[in-house]
Amino acid sequence: MIHFLPDPETAVPAQSDAVAARAGGLARALEIVEQIGGESSGFSHADFAARLASAGDSRMLDLMSERAVAASVAGLEAIALLSESGGTANPAAARLLADTIRDALNEMGALLSL
């Protein structure tokens, strides 16, 4: 019998699932980087996640989350490498990375507010 529904095991996750996963990873990375930079977290991940869940699929949010991850990866990798080698990240650099991640999440939040 021919059917046109994808198998649940092989189905590609919805765009909103990918965006939520990226945003969740960015929010967790922000918490860690803020701690390294000596800042307290002011980002409300629970509120953001709730607004994101109600947004549905959005190509713009997908692109924004991809760009945010790409912009953050190098800094996060550098912090991880320093940590693995026994070093510590420069707090000022960590604050700059936190600002980058926070700005990206805030841009996504602004789009959700429209």
Image (cartoon, rainbow, N blue to C red):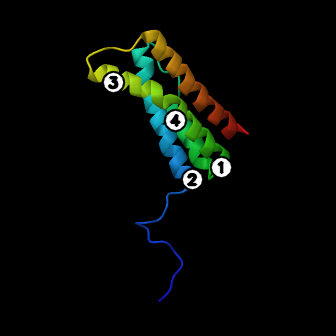
Q: Earlier in the sequence, mark 4 or mark 2?
A: 2
**Label at residue 69:** 4
Disc 4 or disc 2, which is closer to the eye? 4
Q: Indicate left or right for 99 with 31 as reference.
A: right
Counting residues from the start of the chain, the first of labels 2 and 3 encountered is 2
Q: Nearer the viewer, mark 2 or mark 3?
A: 3
Upstream in the sequence, badge 4 or badge 1? Answer: 1
Q: Amino acid at mark 2?
A: Gln
Identify the mark at residue 15; answer none if there is no mark. Answer: 2
Q: Dot 1 surroundings within 10 Å: few (below 14), some, or many (20 or more)? A: few
Residue 59: mark: 1
Residue contact between numbered discs 2 and 1, judged by CB atoms under 8 Å: yes
In the rendered image, the vertical position of residue 72 relative to residue 24, given as above or below: above
Cα–Cα span, label 4 and label 2: 15 Å
Q: Earlier in the sequence, mark 4 or mark 3?
A: 4
- Callouts 3 and 1 close, C-beta under 8 Å: no
Residue at image coords 50%, 36%: 46
Crowding at dot 4, Cα within 10 Å, few <14 / some 14-19 / many 20+, comes out as: some
Q: Residue 90 in the image: x percent, y percent?
A: 41, 11
Considering only order in the chain, which callout, 1 or 2, is on the residue closer to the N terminus?
Answer: 2
Q: Secondary structure at mark 2?
A: helix
- Residue 113 can be seen in this image: yes
Question: How far across and how far down the image is residue 14, in percent?
Answer: 54, 57
Which residue is at a point 49% across and 61% down the rendered structure image?
12
Q: Examine the rendered structure and indicate whether residue 14 appears above or below residue 30.
A: below
Disc 1 residue type (three-letter): Arg
The residue singled out by tag 3 in the image is 81
Task: Give me the C-alpha separation between circle 2 and circle 3.
Answer: 31 Å
**Placement of 67 over or under 6, stated as above or below:** above
